[in-house]
Image (tube, grey):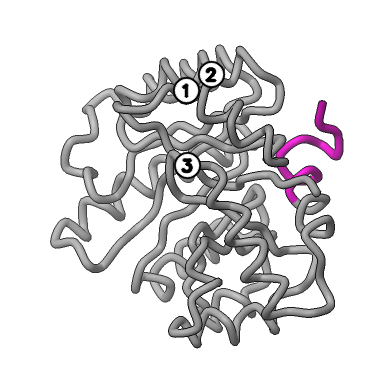
Amino acid sequence: MQFIDAHCHLSPDTDFLSAFARANSKGVVGCVVNSVHQYDWGKIAELAASNTNIRGAIGIHPWIADAAPQNLKSEMSAMLDANPNLIVGEIGMDKTRDNFARQETIFILMLEIAIKYKRIVNLHCVHAWDRVLEIFNTYRNELPPIIAHGFDGTSNAIDFDANLYFSYSPNIANPKYKKVHESVLRVPKSKILIESDSDDLTNVITAADGLCATRHDISAMDVFHNAQGVFFNGQIA
């Protein structure tokens, strides 16, 4: 069995390549490692350049939107120019934080960069789908593939007419997340991904087990092929 982790992170206490090697021995053959702030970008670009099965994503997490640099547009554009395989993430909006207006400004700026460079977006969205979908609707005919990471099951996101993928974290294995379980039954089979959302990529296997236990018409290999297609152009080493 093979797995691709659609959303993982660096940790200051973990050697990422060693963590990836350990996960690889258990079948995790590819991953997308996401930044939180611009200080991650260089390291993530290096990791992605070191292994063709690692995709790097650069962006500013909405929780720290207030710390986004004034020259964000030029810095991010320069990184994407220099690294054609980088995608954009983790970016988005989160109403559990009190900097929502600033989040929106930074999110739109980075979304427009992703559109310009035709890069996939790894999206963080918490209690903000109504506004995020309004923004997406503004750019409807230009949007690249959008990965709704740690998807919470919001129904209007599933029904939105765009190239949205829905990535499920290990929470899908927890029976208390009923809304998430219900959403899995509605999401098109070809749009389902799984993720660890951590620096321990083996957690993606828990997500795969929970997903397949909930939706019996899909296998871990189906999800693998979805991720292989969207992140690796259908080919992975």
Q: Which residue is mark 2?
A: 47
Q: Nearer the viewer, residue 153 or 102?
A: 153
What type is the residue that disc 2 sits on?
Leu
- Tag 2 near tag 3, CB within 8 Å: no
Q: Residues within 10 Å of mark 1 (few under 14, many from 20)?
A: many
What type is the residue that disc 3 sits on?
Asp
Q: Nearer the viewer, mark 2 or mark 3?
A: 3
Q: Residues within 10 Å of mark 3 (few under 14, many from 20)?
A: some
Direction from residue 175 to residue 214 in the image, left or right: right
Direction from residue 121 to residue 214 in the image, left or right: right
Quadrant the C terminus occupies: top right
- Tag 1 near tag 3, CB within 8 Å: no
Q: Which residue is mark 3?
A: 200
Q: Which residue is mark 1?
A: 44
What type is the residue that disc 1 sits on?
Ile
Which of the marked residues, 2 or 3, is nearer the chain's N terminus? 2
Q: Gap in Å between the C-alphas at discs 2 and 3?
A: 16 Å
> Residue 150: percent from the left, percent from the top?
48, 61
Looking at the image, which residue is at 80% across and 49% down? 1
| Residue 228 located within the stretch drawn in magenta | yes
Tag 2's secondary structure? Answer: helix
The stretch in magenta equals 227-237
Tag 3's secondary structure? Answer: loop
Direction from residue 217 to residue 153 in the image, left or right: left
Q: Gap in Å between the C-alphas at discs 1 and 3?
A: 16 Å
Q: Residues within 10 Å of mark 2 (few under 14, many from 20)?
A: some
Whether 202 is drawn above or below 22: the answer is below
